[in-house]
Amino acid sequence: MHDSLIAYIKKYSTTPLKEGDDELIKNTFLAKRIRKKQFLLQEGEVCKYTAFIVKGAMRQYSVDEKGTEHIVRLTIENWWAVDRESFTMLTPSVYNIDAWEDTDALLVTRADFLSNLGGMPALNEMTRKMDENHASALQKRVIASISFSAEKRYEDFARQYPEFIQRFPQHIIASYLGITKETLSRIRHQLVKK
Amino acid sequence: MHDSLIAYIKKYSTTPLKEGDDELIKNTFLAKRIRKKQFLLQEGEVCKYTAFIVKGAMRQYSVDEKGTEHIVRLTIENWWAVDRESFTMLTPSVYNIDAWEDTDALLVTRADFLSNLGGMPALNEMTRKMDENHASALQKRVIASISFSAEKRYEDFARQYPEFIQRFPQHIIASYLGITKETLSRIRHQLVKK
DNA sequence: AAAAAATGTTGACAAATGTCAACAGAACGA
DNA sequence: TCGTTCTGTTGACATTTGTCAACATTTTTT
């Protein structure tokens, strides 16, 4: 269960893990099964956990005053589910995170992370890299949303994250891209013809 | 010249500066005057400096294949101008940063920052907070761009950053919001009538 | 197995936004 | 000061995207 997390950490840090670090990580991240439609985080709460996804798929989204969901982030195996702002600043979140598929996750609280893993260079390095990558990805998404047409945004998305196209239905992808499901359906129709 | 930076650091960190830290900061951040239209960073280069803006205004933008500029970020006094990804990872940037007004800035290279200030807790804390705030702001901008109409995006922007409306012309604001200058002009016309 | 919910497509039409061109006043540079 | 560039507005029209409704299929739940 924890093997994929250990592998992930090794992949994203240059510092090697020390003797006993493996055990500490395994004891600090708690395995939890989150069934489809169950919430990891609900709007208004403080984001208590950072979740590493071992198997399954989750989504993070906000809900507007009309009740429409806007997908902020999609997460599958070997990615993290968390509202980083709420988790680190302990502020109430404006987002929801729920399981789209039955999901096996490894959870850690901020307190446990700091007390048990805060002194582990490999983990701090990995966390910093995750944050940097996340910021870069957000920056690119901003650029895409102000620069490109819906069609180009979908093409880019499908090229960069082919997995996601398989795992999530079109209306979820459409929401992520900021378009309606009808528009996405028509864009796909266009692209097939080409 | 460096006073506003020192004040800024104190404001954004809980750790106090130690005796001599002021001097070290002043010697590490080099004052530079950047005249209007001069570049701090050009596409394809590695972002060599992080710039704290003491006075003036800068913009960060990408240019698409049609030659259209897309504004990523606007910066005035007491904000930072930098492509964080390029600066920290030493990768070539896809962005340009230039001065919109004659600007007084304080520059620091990554090497100087790490060697002179890397061990200063207050500065590390501030840097981390800046990165967190930046990520949160990007997240909100993504949500806005996929959720809201151009009119609402402009209203929110004008409410949150009234300074920017004064300092930058409409076509720059329009580009930041991902709309054309004509559409922005019409939106403003609408809002006046209300 | 039956009913309900989720998914995806399509048509008709509406609304939002973009494109192109013309114009006017302000600001700037030679 | 003269000419040029920058800025902002407006009209006419085109394109993109959204809205609503109907429908067929598939999947899930009871």
Image: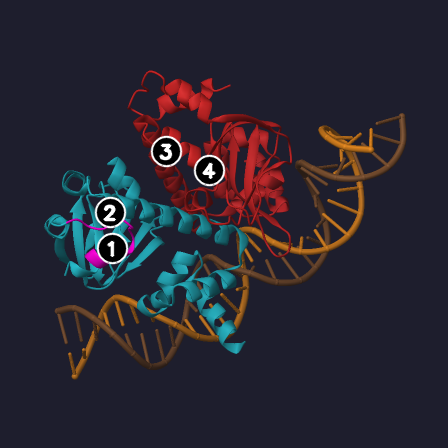
Chain colours: A red, B cyan, C brown, D orange
* Residue receiving disc 1: B10
For mark 2, give the secondary structure. helix
User: How many residues crowd mark 1 within 10 Å: few (<14), some (14–19), many (20+)?
Assistant: some
> What stretch of residues is rendered in magenta?
B6-18
Q: Amino acid at mark 2?
A: Ala
Work out whether residue A185 can be spotted: yes
Sequence-wise first label, 1 or 2: 1
* Residue receiving disc 3: A127
For mark 3, give the secondary structure. helix
User: How many residues crowd mark 3 within 10 Å: few (<14), some (14–19), many (20+)?
Assistant: some
Q: Is residue B78 magenta?
A: no
Q: CA distance from mark 1 to mark 4?
A: 42 Å
Q: Which chain contains the residue that carries disc 4?
A: A
Q: Image point 32% across, 30% down: which residue?
A: A119
Nearer the viewer's eye, disc 1 or disc 4?
1
* Residue receiving disc 4: A156
Q: Which chain contains the residue that carries disc 1?
A: B
Work out whether residue A187 can be spotted: no
Q: Amino acid at mark 3?
A: Thr
